[in-house]
Amino acid sequence: MSTYILRRFLQLIPVFLGATLLVYFLVFSLPGDPIVALFGDKPVNEAVAAKLRVQYHLDQPFWMQYLFYLQSIFTFDLGQDFSGRPIATVLGEVFPVTARLAIMALIFEGVFGIVFGLIAGLRKGKFFDATVLVASLIVIGIPIFVLGFLLQFTIGVQLGWAKPTVSSAATVQDLILPAIVLGLGSFAYVLRLTRTSVIENMNADYVRTATAKGLSRFRVVRVHILRNSLIPVITFLGADLGALMGGAIVTEGIFNIPGVGNRLYRAVLSGEGPTVVSIVTVLVLIYCLSNLLVDLLYAWLDPRIRYDN
Amino acid sequence: MSASVEIQEADDAVERPLLEIKDLAIGFTTSNGEVNAVRNAHLTIMPGETVAIVGESGSGKSTTALAAIGLLPGNGRVSAGQILFDGEDISGASEKRMIELRGNSIGMVPQDPMSNLNPVWKIGDQVRETLKANGLPSGPDDVAKVLSQAGLPDAASRAKQYPHEFSGGMRQRALIAIGLSCQPRLLIADEPTSALDVTVQRQILDHLDKMTTELGTAVLLITHDLGLAAERADQVVVMYRGQVVESGPSLELLQNPQHPYTQRLVASAPSLASRRIQAAKELGVETDDMLAPTETAVVKPSKADEILQIQNLKKVFKLRSGLGKSTDFTAVDDVSFSVKRGTTTAIVGESGSGKSTVAQMVLNLQRPTSGKIIFDGVDTSTLNSKELFAFRRRVQPIFQDPYGSLDPMYNIFRTIEEPLRTHKIGDKASREKKVRELLDQVALPQSTMQRYPNELSGGQRQRVAIARALALDPEVIICDEAVSALDVLVQAQVLNLLAELQSRLGLTYLFITHDLAVVRQIADHVCVMEQGKLVETGSTDDVFDAPQQDYTKALLNAIPGARLMLPPEVAVA
């Protein structure tokens, strides 16, 4: 097992290099001059602009810019964003906020998706099942920004149950409503996945055998149906953690959350290459690590899967 | 209840039947309304007695048994009749009552050991929960005791393993252990060994017999194999299309079957039949010339040359073990034999014996590690892609699973026509004519052409597979377990068809099978394989009448019903 984990970590190196190169290239290819954009409506002061270009290596060709960037990473100095703050500090501010949001969303979609999916699967074709299925289709069908504004308006503004926007501290309480909005789409998927998986397992031979042993219905469901049904669901949830971190841009925009998505959006608009690449690279690493976690969880849940002999 | 009053037999007059099924009807709700899977079923099991229900798939035998333990699938229900367990009608019993009965009063050993153990729990856990649910002591020692009673060696450490670390036979022992762990009075054994190799099957059944006799457990045995039923059960109940058509003491029923269905079943039970299907011999191989079209007419079937020679064939698979390392696994080890034109050679062996690997290599689907396959004088490993294409035309396969080997999106015409189109034979009209001829040859109506595989039965699908194999007028057909998935009656029909086609078309068969009974019916020569090696070869009669190797003897001995003596006129149709 340890050699397997080591191998997976070594695989992160090419992923890291490839991701940074690709993202750097994309940012480099963006149309417009970021330095000119900095001046906004004011006339461009050529002397200042030239100085800034040298400072951010923008006068160099693409490869040189990329190598400068790599050098700064390996010296643990990510450089500064255009407002002059160290990028490392920026990352340290935004990632905890988004991580809190994503984990809350994950817990929401995991707990409710599995519980609702299990009940729907066990009562296949009954009223609860049909209702939940239709509701989940609606949730999947409506874009997240529509759902987001809708819930913000009804629950936040009209009913006043939650604050419609998030304070700069972004406490857990502040993030409940945004987390639900962020997790709703995946919640519907988890629910449907659990339901399908439960229905499949309910008809499995070993479940019939378990019943024939004289086990109570509760034990058959908990021990034989639920655990086996969770294997694909856990896989989905793990992969979804990365997607939630990166996919929070819309939700963070709606609720004005000072997180990764908000900062990334601004960095893309202003063409801040190093900031964009730094944020995206961390997201890529989180994605890789959460996938590794899923694979390890998978082996733990299903003893047939072994990575080393 | 007054059920006991009805018992007629003097010996058992004081005893009450343990299980009595009366006028049972079971309906399934489908989209087309209610379908009756079982009608007017009746059977009686006395305490300690073994009763077998025999029938083909879809006959309602499993459904009847599942009803007795309250495990009908969701859309099935008992619509009429009674199931009396020890005098109590349990056909409409509450789920709570059934949970009380299951395990300690009625146990079950299911059919397929591969799918009936939960793959994510240790074997020991799955035994322990059974003991616990029925209020028995469930410590590690109790679990180990239950497992070792079922004949599992090293039970204490085995209990810590997962199902995938067990072989099929060991899994079935674990399932028997679970079924009998709470010492039920009735054990329902639903095809308990049909997924196992024949020698393992014998051991398991012997052990099951011994345990149930010791515990005084009554057994309801469900099987499709009449020979097995007759050998193991006191009473046999024959079911056909949801109805009980005949029942009585096993030997009596076998020797003197009354109902036409039972008569056919006895006649075609492969384990009871004792002679090569005669069609080929009677018709004579010479008739071939009249029918053989252009390609095969060149080849004179009369000259009994060796069309296929296998020389020192060896196949080694590399198994990965750890980082960069690998161990060799020799699947086929130094196998040599030859096949004469127009004859049938069977390769027999248990799973893992390497027989299918031989077939794959002969079909040129896998490359041998060493050794030669010489087809009609040419070493098949030297063929270039064009020659290989021509080779494929002359050697065709029929595979085991008629459900998996036909493309569900192709209608039957397209399925049979495809090889003709691939090999650019004829135009549209002549190809259609050929497909019609082929359907005639395999005795399928022309209307089949427009149908799809899911609309056909297993036997019909296998006929389609045969027609497809015949489309290119091949000389050799490799049948890899071609009849194993079929019910006995259908199996007999398909074997007859193969024998008839052989005599008409001068075909050569290489028949891969685990079923010795089938070998006896179809083969001229037999090669017995064990763990990759050829242990015995010879003519079918020699091998069956005077087996030389212990392994062959064990195989022969393990055929269910082999030791039953039947009058010859019954055994041969």
Image (cartoon, grey):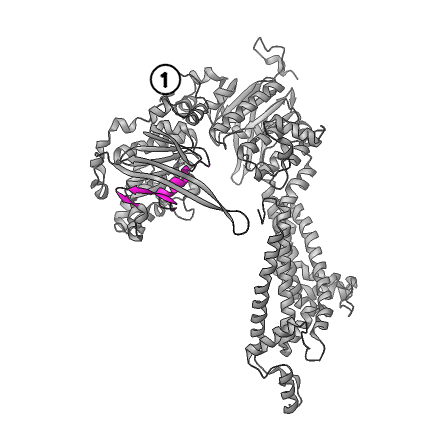
In this view of the protein, which residue sits in the foreground, A143 or A221?
A221
Image quadrant where residue A258 sits: bottom right
Please give the name of the residue rendered at 53% of the width and 41% of the height, measured from the top-left corner: B31
The residue at 60%/53% (across/down) is A3
The front one of B470 and B256 is B470
* Residue type (three-letter) at the residue carrying disc 1: Pro
As rendered, which of A82 and B277 lies closer to the eye? A82
- Residue B421 screen position, x and y as percent: 31, 51
| Residue A66 spot, x, y in % from top left | 58, 75
Q: Is residue A72 visible?
A: yes
B475 sits to left or right of B318 = left
Q: To which residue does mark 1 refer?
A: B568
* Tally of numbered discs: 1
Relative to residue A305, is residue B516 drawn left or right? left
Say above or below: B458 vs B426. Answer: above
Determine the residue positioned at 59% across, 38% down: B163
Q: Quadrant of the N terminus of chain B?
A: top right
Task: Give coordinates of residue B513: x percent, y percent.
Answer: 40, 33
Which range is magenta? B351-379
User: Residue B99 falls in which quadrant of the image?
Assistant: top right
The percent position of residue B494, horizontal first and vertical second, equals 36, 33
Residue lying farthest top? Answer: B10
Quarter of the image that includes the C terminus of chain B: top left
Mark 1 is surrounded, within 10 Å at the Cα level, by few (under 14), some (14 to 19) or many (20 or more) other residues, namely few
Residue A258 seen: no
Q: Quadrant of residue B169?
A: top right
Vertical side of B353 occupied by B385: above or below: below
Q: Chain of mark 1?
A: B
Q: Is residue B417 left or right of residue A163?
A: left
Position of B503 with respect to B38 (left or right) is left
Instruction: Please report the residue visible at 62 percent of the width from the left and 74 percent of the height from the top.
Output: A71
